[in-house]
Amino acid sequence: MKDDPEHKHFVFDESATSLIQALLSCPGEPSPATTASVKFMITLQDERDLLNLGYTQEQITKLTPREAMDIIQAGTKELSRSIK
């Protein structure tokens, strides 16, 4: 798919087998593999996951979204509450 600056529309070339493939191969857009994402909030599912890992609501509210994501992805259990 090529951008046609004179007419403000896209021209599909023969190599594109579908509209989706053409849109995904658009050279002006970053590919999904090169796009960065930043977590900006802790979702309800994140809270549930953290609670299931042993974290308290107080501990969860002190976490940054990135910290919460890292803990969930690693499956890191909160140990201080279970140690006596």
Image (spheres, grey):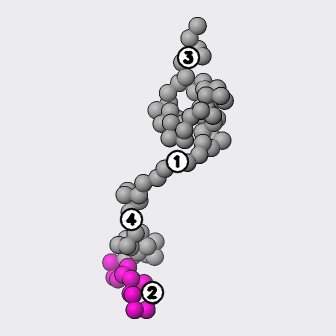
Q: Secondary structure at mark 2?
A: strand
Q: Nearer the viewer, mark 2 or mark 1?
A: 1
Q: Earlier in the sequence, mark 3 or mark 2?
A: 2
Tell me the magenta residue range.
1-15
Q: Gap in Å between the C-alphas at discs 2 and 4? A: 19 Å
| Residue 48 image offset from top left, x and y in percent | 64, 35
Q: Gap in Å between the C-alphas at discs 4 and 1? A: 19 Å
Task: Report the residue marked by disc 3.
Answer: 80
Q: Secondary structure at mark 1?
A: loop
- Quadrant of the image occupied by residue 36: bottom left
Q: Earlier in the sequence, mark 1 or mark 3?
A: 1
- Quadrant of the image occupied by residue 62: top right
- Quadrant of the image occupied by residue 34: bottom left
| Residue 49 image offset from top left, x and y in percent | 60, 34
Q: State the mark number for residue 9.
A: 2
| Residue 13 lies in the magenta stretch | yes
View extreme (top): residue: 84
Q: Gap in Å between the C-alphas at discs 1 and 3? A: 26 Å
